[in-house]
Image (cartoon, helix red, strand yellow):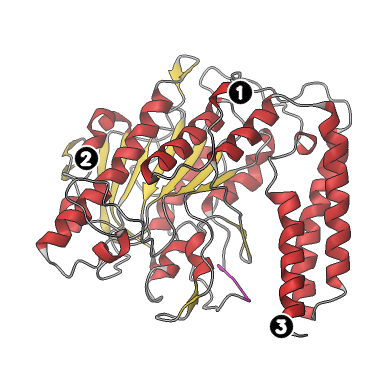
Amino acid sequence: MSNSRHALSRRTFIRGAGTCLALPWLEAMTPAYAGPETVKGPTRLGVLFMPNGVREDEWTPSGKGRDFEFSKTLRPLSAFKEQLLIPTNLWNQGSVGGDGHYVKTSGFLTCQTIQKSLGFDLNSNGTSMDQVAAQRLGNQTPLPSLELAISPVSIGVDRNVGYTRVYGSHIAWSRPTRPLAREINPRLVFERLFRLSNPNAAHSQHDKLLLDRVLGDARQLKRRVGSDDQSRIDDYLDSVRSLERRVEQASKPVGKTWKPAVDMDPADKPEGIPEAHAEHVRLMLDMIALAFQTDSTRICTFMFGNAVSGTNFSFLDGVNGGHHSISHHERKEKNLVQYQKIAQWHVEQYAYLLQKLQNMPEGESNVLDNSMILFGSGLRDGNSHNPRDLPLVVAGSAGGRLQTGQHLVCEKKTPLANLYCSMLDAFGTPVDSFGDSTGPLPGVLA
């Protein structure tokens, strides 16, 4: 196959996939909502991923258990002390062998070692924790899960370490070879959620026509590519056929259909992607809060930046430069001061989301109390790329299922996967094991 023909086929495939995946989630695909409402409200699971690590000596709280004091970086969370679980000494063993950032990013929620690749054979060697939950309980809401980010998917190969940059753009994997597409435009996220809340009968027929076109394009493409790509297209067709079955199912009368927990005001729709990074982040966090409040989904991941993110943080007082370059601080105090400011800014954004969720009443509680919102990075220190003692915080008690209000000091080299086992249990999707787990993390489950 010539290069030009390969490029054309690839664009055709991406365009076909985009027709299905980039649209707001279709109402016709929505399964019937049959779960009873409870006083406590449903449990939500959120993950906020920060690239490039933190300044180590300004992260870990002093003291342990309930008798702890916030570090400088974590001080913006002081108002939420009783809602926090801060684990120390967790590590992701699966990311130890990889160079640089990519293994630490793509393996953050899988606790597996990704396959080294230049981009043609992506393999995370596992399903991410969020998708384990989504595959078991995602049918209770119109969106099984929602994947958001700030930066577009990175392309090309990082020649310094020999990994495709695509790995650095994904933390959510529905299967080992299938990273989930992220939305970076807050306006499109709002439109997707609004469309769920305000269904239009004409949408169903239009959605069916779109699916037919996607299937037709994919079948034509399959005849023009080699056996490896045919296998990938088969995976894609399986996904589209699944959507088609959901279209057919949704067209049948049901006793009770899903309804949004609150109404959405179309006047609140964002204009698009803001030029200012800080404003962009806030809008995406607003979309997470809206998705949880309306119960459009109960599972969401958000990436503040891709691996090796070079976002310029000069908008912060005392910072001059890009995140990744500053993270390679070389133990110079000038760089370390800036590195800490960037990490603290991310924690402040986390606190912003927590406050929004706490301000949303739900029965006798609020959305934050009924949630588990994990904040963290796939490495501790950007200078050494150290994946041990990861910087992590969990907010919300999952409706009383987690023991919050504590700094949990674990034994050194405790698997990160143990925390995920506990969170999956609290979410109502318990597993016997996950990644390299040795069991639930003691002291987490209530």
Q: Main secondary structure of the magenta part?
A: loop
Q: Quadrant of residue 219?
A: bottom right
Which comes sooner in the sequence, label 2 or label 1?
2
Q: What's the residue at 31%, 63% (across, down)?
A: 324
The numbered mark, 1 or 3, whose residue comes first in the sequence reads 3
Discs 2/1, front: 1
Relative height, residue 439 to residue 155 (above, below) = above
Q: CA distance from mark 2 to mark 1?
A: 45 Å
Residue 218 location (% of width, % of height): 83, 63
x then y, percent, for residue 269:
56, 29
Q: Furthest residue to the bottom?
A: 2
* Residue at the outermost left position: 333
- The N terminus lies in quadrant: bottom right
**Residue 274 visible:** yes
Query: Could you tell me the amino acid type at mark 3?
Result: Asn
Amino acid type, mark 1: Pro
Dot 2 amino acid type: Gly
Q: Is residue 409 visible in the rendered structure shown here?
A: no
Q: Say whether disc 2 or disc 3 marks the residue closer to the N-terminus.
A: 3
Q: Which residue is mark 3?
A: 3
Q: How many marks?
A: 3
Q: Quadrant of residue 124?
A: bottom right
Measuring from the top left, give residue 312's x and y in whole percent: 32, 55
Q: State the SS at label 3.
A: helix
Task: Please report the residue visible at 46 percent of the width from the left and 81 percent of the height from the top.
Answer: 162
Question: Going by the image, does 145 lie left or right of 288?
Answer: right
What numbered label is drawn on residue 65?
2
**Depth order, front residue of 133/260:** 260
Residue 329 drawn above or below residue 29: below
Numbered badge on residue 266: 1
Highlighted range, magenta: 120-124
